[in-house]
Amino acid sequence: MKNLSFEWLVGLRYTRAGRRSSRNSFISFISLISMAGIALGVAALIIVLSVMNGFQKEVRDRMLSVLPHIEVFDASGVIPDWQATAQQTLKHPAVLAAAPYVDAQSMIVNDGVMRGAMLRGILPEDEPKVSIIATKVKAGKLTDLKEGAFNIILGVDLARAMHVGIGDKVTLAAPEGQLTPAGTIPRLKGFTVVAVFEAGHYEFDSGMAFIHIADAQKFFRQEAPTGVRLKIKDMLKAPQVAFELSRTLGGSLIARDWSQQNSNYFAAVKTEKTMMFIILTLIIAVAAFNLVSTLVMTVTEKQADIAILRTLGASPMSIMKIFMVQGGLVGLFGTALGVLSGIIVALNIDVIVPFIEKILGIQFLSKEVYVISTLPSDLHWSDVWTIGGIAIVLAFLATIYPSWRAARVKPAEALRYE
């Protein structure tokens, strides 16, 4: 403390003093409210961004249990020599595995119930190399898909809607009809349900099915697979790898990464996260600018002290520093408290939320309504530093006007009525 300048010593004294009169007590109360407001805003912003990061990560991981990191397909709709294309993509250092696929829309019918579904033909022995769908199979096995057996694996919600289970039959209707003398009639084929999967994403669990790639080519009358699915080392680098593959593959081949397949969803999440950041930052700004009223009241209360300091030789800049120290410390303490509280809650939200749900007897996220039924959290330290920095800067800016006003106090006028 002895090594501190007098501006810091006086600023620290003003920060912790002020309970000898009712007016000083009120000023101290306002300072505490400002500090609490900053802490609450900082903590809320850290928690909300962590939850949104966790939600985005959880949904992305569940999507990628079914979707590939990168798809390579031909503009014509089929890749006749998919093995050569797969070998070419594997030359890229970031590509770990490749597997062929067939994608097409189909109608699934059973006992008068009809549902549209995305039908995907796969090679059961190669599919685990590019996705984790095999680990999502809840009943049966992925290897139960046999060439020529016309077996099918349904999403758990799709199977429930169709009222079918393992061993039951469903009928698939191809989009292209069959031309006969009587006209065009639907092309139908019976399939046996051999397994049920649960990806944890309602869109896939209620609208996707898998069959053997050879059966898919026969049913949809394709001469070759639709394309090749790729797994890479770092899925976050998929856009860059897809761009590089597009340049090296040449011809009519197109490489599309997972973010392009779900661009609308991820764009909406990004926009929502940005708006929440702006809205909650305004809460911090309101709390920070409460410091303005606190410091203005302090300046009014301490005019005699300011005048005495000026007559003792303190410069206007020194007076400014005193009140900027006072306001800055309030902002710093509030930010530190908010950061600490936000980190604790964000890291333990998987324990806190179930505890609250148990006490209140409610469930915040219903599986029937939301994509996931638990509240995830993914704390990014970069967010923490950004939020803390913004709060401190806003608190510092709030001290400028009251400090400038204190520096303009004229000693003679301030001491006239003392």
Image (cartoon, rainbow, N blue to C red):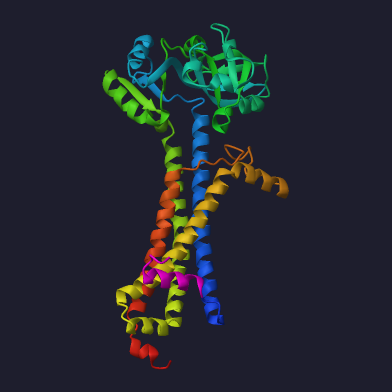
Q: Quadrant of residue 332?
A: bottom left
Specify the farthest residue to the bottom.
Answer: 417
Residue 110 position (above or below residue 394): above
Q: Main secondary structure of the magenta part?
A: helix
| Residue 63 vs residue 301, the one in the foreground | 301
Query: Looking at the figure, which quarter contains the N terminus?
Result: bottom left
Q: Is residue 181 above or below residue 377?
A: above
Picture coordinates of residue 392 (x, y %)?
41, 59
Q: Determine the residue positioned at 30% across, 73% down.
A: 317
- 177 vs 259, left or right, is right
The part of the chain drawn in magenta is 1-17
Which quadrant would the C terminus be assigned to in this image? bottom left
Query: In this view of the protein, which residue sits in the foreground, 46 or 221?
Result: 46
Picture coordinates of residue 179 (x, y %)? 47, 13
In depth, the one of 254 and 359 nearer the eye is 359
Q: How many marks?
A: 0
Q: Residue placed farthest to the top in the image?
A: 148
Residue 226 visible in the picture: no
Q: Residue at x 43, y 81 (%)?
A: 302
Q: Residue 185 location in percent, x, y?
A: 52, 16
Residue drawn at point x = 35 percent, y = 75 percent = 319
Q: Is residue 8 magenta?
A: yes
Which corner quadrant of the image does residue 12 belong to? bottom left
User: Can the viewer see residue 98 in this picture?
Assistant: yes
Image height of 264 relative to 238, above or below: below
Q: Nearer the viewer, residue 274 or 378?
A: 378
| Residue sticking out furthest to the front | 2
Q: Is residue 355 left or right of residue 10?
A: right
The answer to if 88 sits in the magenta stretch is no
